[in-house]
């Protein structure tokens, strides 16, 4: 397998503002609470829906923000970006592509680390019975996911990438992210290897 290319191949970086490092004097002159906390994690999720079932961005937004008992009742959707079955990227929360997570960039992906994380989700993650976890990513979804990873690492080269199941005892995103990243040739310092719930053994044959 060819080493991972840090440069995104799709037009995911067009029309984005310049990195905050370009105006470092202005940034470091601001209070940390205004600048945001350092961007530490890119967390990968799935929608926990059956393989092949079309789920729209509006569906996910409704699940997360509609008042209880019809939704989670959150003010903000849980993910920064959603990857649809056909590989289309839907951005819920725009980031200014720097090494901080500002207050307007915070999403509700993983309790306890949201202030330092960006959350990426693909549609799918369950088998047809809706009971068993399944890495159901289509080739188009994988391609877009790689583009987003490349985009993020281009402006935040020290970010660690992980799966939701490395922070919560749930199968999401239905594969063990570190092993996948290692096979791709992602730099070791960008891979978060924690596994407190043993999902590496569940999802990896070796």
Image: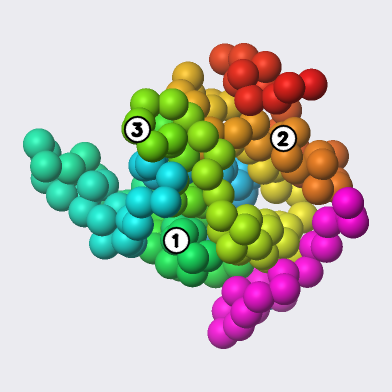
Q: Which stretch did the figure color magenta?
A: 1-22
> Would you name the residue on which mark 3 appears?
130
Residue that mark 2 sits on: 178
Which image quarter holds the C terminus? top right
Q: Residues within 10 Å of mark 2 (few under 14, many from 20)?
A: many
Task: Say which quarter of the image contains residue 44.
Answer: top right
Res. 21 visible in picture: no
User: Which residue does the image show at 11% across and 42% down from the upper left?
Assistant: 70
Answer with left or right where residue 206 lies relative to residue 168: right
Q: Can you give x and y, in whole percent of width and height, for residue 118 in the image?
A: 53, 50
Does the segment drawn in magenta span residue 18?
yes
Q: Residue at x 72, y 35 (%)?
A: 178
How far, Cα to Cα, is label 3 from label 1? 18 Å
Q: Determine the secondary structure under disc 2.
A: helix
Mark before the other along the chain sequence, 2 or 3: 3
Residue located farthest toward the right when viewing the structure as drawn = 2
Q: Residue at x 37, y 26 (%)?
A: 131
The answer to whether residue 50 is visible is: yes
Q: Is residue 45 left or right of residue 182?
A: left
The image shows residue 117, relative to residue 5, as above or below, that is above
Instruction: Identify the residue at image location x=56%, y=55%.
Output: 138
Q: Secondary structure at mark 1?
A: loop
Which numbered disc flags the more N-terminal residue, 3 or 1? 1
Q: Nearer the viewer, residue 160 or 163?
A: 163
The colouring scheme, among rainbow, by chain, secondary structure or one colour, is rainbow
């Amino acid at each position: 397998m060819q080493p991972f290319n840090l440069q995104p191949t799709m037009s995911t970086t067009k029309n984005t503002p310049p990195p905050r490092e370009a105006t470092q004097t202005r940034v470091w002159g601001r209070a940390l609470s205004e600048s945001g906390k350092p961007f530490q994690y890119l967390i990968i999720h799935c929608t926990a829906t059956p393989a092949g079932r079309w789920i729209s961005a509006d569906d996910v937004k409704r699940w997360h923000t509609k008042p209880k008992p019809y939704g989670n009742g959150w003010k903000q959707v849980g993910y920064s970006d959603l990857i649809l079955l056909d590989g289309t990227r839907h951005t819920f929360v725009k980031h200014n592509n720097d090494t901080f997570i500002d207050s307007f960039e915070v999403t509700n992906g993983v309790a306890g680390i949201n202030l330092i994380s960006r959350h990426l989700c693909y549609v799918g993650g369950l088998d047809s019975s809706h009971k068993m976890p399944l890495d159901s990513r289509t080739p188009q979804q994988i391609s877009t996911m790689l583009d987003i990873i490349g985009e993020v690492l281009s402006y935040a080269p020290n970010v660690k990438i992980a799966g939701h199941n490395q922070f919560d005892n749930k199968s999401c995103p239905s594969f063990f992210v570190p092993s996948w990243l290692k096979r791709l040739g992602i730099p070791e310092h960008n891979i978060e290897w924690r596994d407190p719930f043993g999902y590496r053994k569940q999802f990896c044959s070796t």
